[in-house]
Amino acid sequence: MKTPFFIKNLSLLFALLILSFCMLSCTRCSEPPKEPVSDSYKKKLISSREGRVLYDEYSRTNNAILTKYRNGEPDSRWYWFSVEDMEGYIQYVKETAKKQKLKNPGIRIYMGKYPINHPKSKMAKPEYAGYQTIFLVPTAQNLKKDSTTAMSRTMRSTDENTNVTDMQYLNMTNLAPPPKVSTAGMQ
């Protein structure tokens, strides 16, 4: 007895449907492709010699003024975040900016100083009270013009990217309490 043409095609269609379902299921299980990392940073790299020029110029000028103001005691000279902390913070900024539909997210680096009575839980080490620090602030392009933020005028930007005040900033960096000689070598 011959199998009707309709039954053969139905079996073939059913088999294709099951195969398609299996392939789609496997595709969804795989990790989504990662965004390519831009190599635009390569144009901004400097050599250790160029870094030394910047360090020495800071030592000769700005740090000399700070040291004089601090009665001969130099201020902190460098700040350190782990690569893991930086990657995590960058991912936080990217994901939050994407959720908020912000364009051209970035990170601005600000100089700051811990007040002598700064809460110990808000510093990497309590002995950093009174030293300068840096903190990172997320930025984005085309934010709403909102003048109700409590940010000081010096933190408002006039360039195309503005601070995103409803994202968390990053601080709690390890810093180098300075050696007694403000012109100590960059290590």
Image: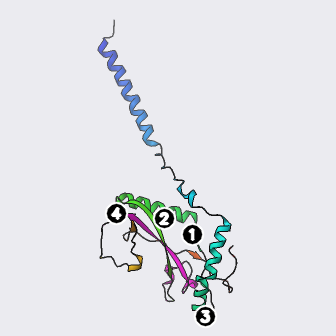
Q: Tell me which numbered mark, 4 or 2, is placed earlier along the sequence.
A: 2
Magenta segment: 117-146
The answer to whether mark 1 and mark 3 are in CB contact below 8 A is no
Residue 20 appears at what percent x and percent y? 39, 30
Coloring applied to the structure: rainbow
Mark 4 vs mark 2, foreground winner is 4
Circle 2 is placed at which residue position? 89
Residue at 58 percent of width and 66 percent of height: 82
Q: Secondary structure at mark 3?
A: loop
Q: Nearer the viewer, residue 54 or 149?
A: 54
In this rendered view, identify the residue nearer to me: 74 or 91: 74
Q: Give the residue at x 46% y 66%.
A: 107
Residue carrying label 1: 81
Which residue matches tag 4? 142
Residue 71, label in figure: 3
Residue 156 placed where, x, y %? 39, 75
Secondary structure under tag 2 reads: helix
Q: Position of residue 185 (x, y in %)?
A: 70, 77
The C terminus sits in image quarter: bottom right
- Calculate the distance from the C-alpha at mark 4 to the C-alpha at mark 3: 44 Å
Mark 1 or mark 3, earlier in chain: 3
